[in-house]
Amino acid sequence: MSAPERIPPRSVTPPEPSELLALGELTVRGRVREASNAVLYCTVEYQGHSMPCVYKPVAGERPLWDFPDGTLAQREVAAYEVSEATGWGLVPPTVLRDGPYGEGMCQLWVEVEMADGDGDDGDDGDGGDGGSGTELLALIEGDEPGPGWKAVGFAEVGEGRTALLVHADDVRLRRLAVLDAVINNGDRKGGHLLPAAGGRLYAIDHGVTFNADDKLRTLLWGWAGEPLPDDVVEALGGLAERLADGGPLCARLAELITTAEIEALRARVAVLLRTGVHPVPSGQWPAIPWPPV
């Protein structure tokens, strides 16, 4: 009589997403063809649990002249580490690991929750439960954004017409605008905003970040020059402490970005704390990425 087939044990408690991403077996299911670099849709399985994820191998990155050091994958992971240090959880769990095509970034796949109806849910713009799907960004007629919205600027919409580009006056977007200023995001587009179940907002595509020179380009300029909320100032103060030499966050970032980039990161946090206001466009280069989506 043959021995019964052994069934792999399944853990009762699912592993944390970061653990699953780092230790699980990656299986490529397809490719996101719209991306400028190699982006592979995968599943990752570990201890009987699985979830969808994105894998961006370093081998599929296109060199950037103004980011000669490190890799896009490393900066994506660094953005996640800084996001976690603020306590805002705006970047999906992201790890650096080996995969079928070599080392790369592996990130939790986020299912987007679209808004129901026409998006007029009565949100008063205080950042409570509102702002999902198409409600985060809009093009409107007229010169004023209206209640619950913040103006970014005028955009050409064809046939010599312009419309006002606006984004929601939403606490999640406001925190993301600050995070982008901290990590020096050079490419915050509308397609990088992922409203998820439970009112969560995630942001993706952080390869063009942490440059020592000012590179901030974003669609989230609506609060430019306005005072930072108290909770944001508190979070930035905690981040400044965690960025001190010898701390675990600083040690982790040293594995991902250069010493000069870490010093510039500290300096940006210090400026935000000293001025107490959202940054404004420098006027030295286009402040809004193109294309904006």
Image (cartoon, helix red, strand yellow):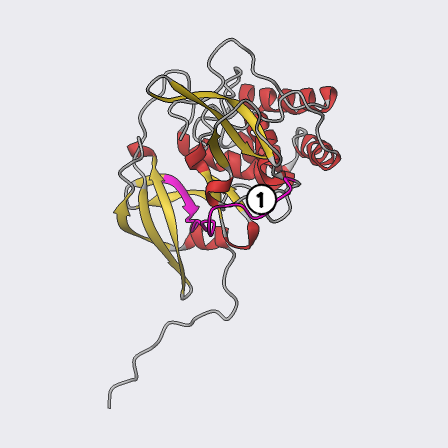
Magenta residues, start to end:
104-125
The residue depicted at 28 percent of the width and 41 percent of the height is 101
Residue 17 visible at all: yes
Residue found at the very far bottom of the displayed protein: 1
> Which residue is more in the foreground, 241 or 274?
274
Q: Label 1 amino acid?
A: Gly
Please tell me whether the stretch drawn in magenta is mainly helix, strand or loop.
Answer: loop
The structure residue drawn at horizontal position 41% and vertical position 36%, both measured from the top left corner, is 191
Left or right: where 114 falls relative to 4: right
Q: Quadrant of the N terminus?
A: bottom left
Outermost residue, left side:
1
Residue 204 visible? The answer is no
Q: Which residue is mark 1?
A: 89
Q: Which residue is at the front of the view, 112 or 186?
A: 112
Q: Secondary structure at mark 1?
A: loop
Whether residue 268 appears in magenta in the rendering, the answer is no
> What is the quadrant of residue 96 in the picture?
top left
| Residue 36 sits in quarter | top left
